[in-house]
Image (tube, rainbow, N blue to C red):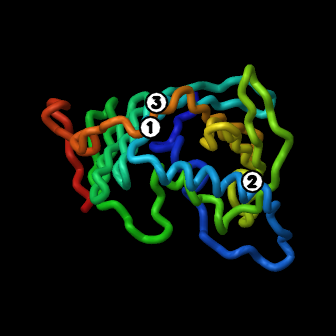
Amino acid sequence: MKKIPILSFILLLISSLSFAQTPKGMGKSDPEAKKILDEVSTKFKSYKTVKANFALKIENAAGKTQGSKSGVLQMKGMKYKVDITGQEIFCDSKNVWTLDKSANEVQVSKLDESAGNITPQKLFSNFYDNDFLYVTNDDVKRGNKVYQVVELTPIDKTKPFFKVLVEVDKATKTIMSTRVFEKNGNRYIYTINSLSTNAPIADETFVFDAKKFPGVEVIDLR
């Protein structure tokens, strides 16, 4: 399987965002699409905690699965923890620990608090504001659930992807899947398999504890 970058679930959509304003002549976004995304953002910001079980699948241009991974994302305010196959990322809102389990190595860095900082929280909130044009597609029904589909096109055409499809549960106003279309034909499909909110999560969850990983090498980049 192609190596998936650390925090790929979080960063693929927004790691290269420039926060540029919409250039003249680029067209306008659909007000209905913005309404859907704004509802998602508002609903997410109302949660005290979030825990999501997710899956990532990579397909090539022919639709053949190249590999898959699963993981768990936990969030509390600006704190987060991501556990994906072979990797764990901890953030206590000040520091970020990135653990590579195969190398038994953890890198520690300061959380960048600048406007362009990437956090899991942005995936569920206002990542779309200045970097995409967006329109609504037809709703999709699976079982007894209806999903609203928003298509996003990056304003910066140098990005490695040309389209993103976001599916929003119409009843709960939460993002349940994201499909990223790369220019090379690859597609990254992220699916939220389960989502729980407002359950207690201890603050210690978001702090790396070296005692739990005997012999781990700590590389402090702060």
Q: Earlier in the sequence, mark 2 or mark 1?
A: 2
Q: Would you call the spot at circle 1 few (<14 residues within 10 Å), some (14-19), or many (20 or more)?
A: some
Q: Position of residue 14 (x, y in %)?
A: 58, 56
Are the two marked residues, 2 and 1, in contact with CB atoms closer than 8 angstroms? Answer: no
> To which residue does mark 3 refer?
71
Instruction: State the residue lying farthest toward the top.
Output: 143
Q: Amino acid at mark 3?
A: Gly
Q: Is residue 152 left or right of residue 89?
A: right
Between the C-alphas of marks 3 and 1, the distance is 17 Å
Residue at image position (85%, 69%) is 27
**Residue at the image point whose x is 52% and y is 43% from the top:** 8
Vertical side of 115 occupied by 64: above or below: above
The residue to which callout 2 is attached is 152
- Residue at 21 percent of width and 41 percent of height: 204
- Image coordinates of residue 18 in percent, x first then y, are 60, 68
Disc with the residue nearer the chain's start (3 vs 1):
3
Which quadrant would residue 125 be assigned to in this image?
Answer: bottom right
Identify the mark at residue 143; answer none if there is no mark: none
Q: Position of residue 111 (x, y in %)?
A: 34, 60
Along the viewing direction, whichever of 172 and 95 lies nearer the viewer: 172
In the rendered view, tell whether residue 33 sits above or below residue 82: below
212 to the left or right of 41: left
**Do callouts 3 and 1 mark residues in contact (Cβ within 8 Å)?**
no
Name the quadrant of the C terminus.
bottom left
Label pair 3/2, CB-CB below 8 angstroms: no
The residue that mark 1 highlights is 197
Question: Eyeballing the image, is 33 above or below 61?
Answer: below
* Mark-to-mark CA distance, 2 and 1: 26 Å
Given the image, on which type of amino acid does mark 2 rest? Leu
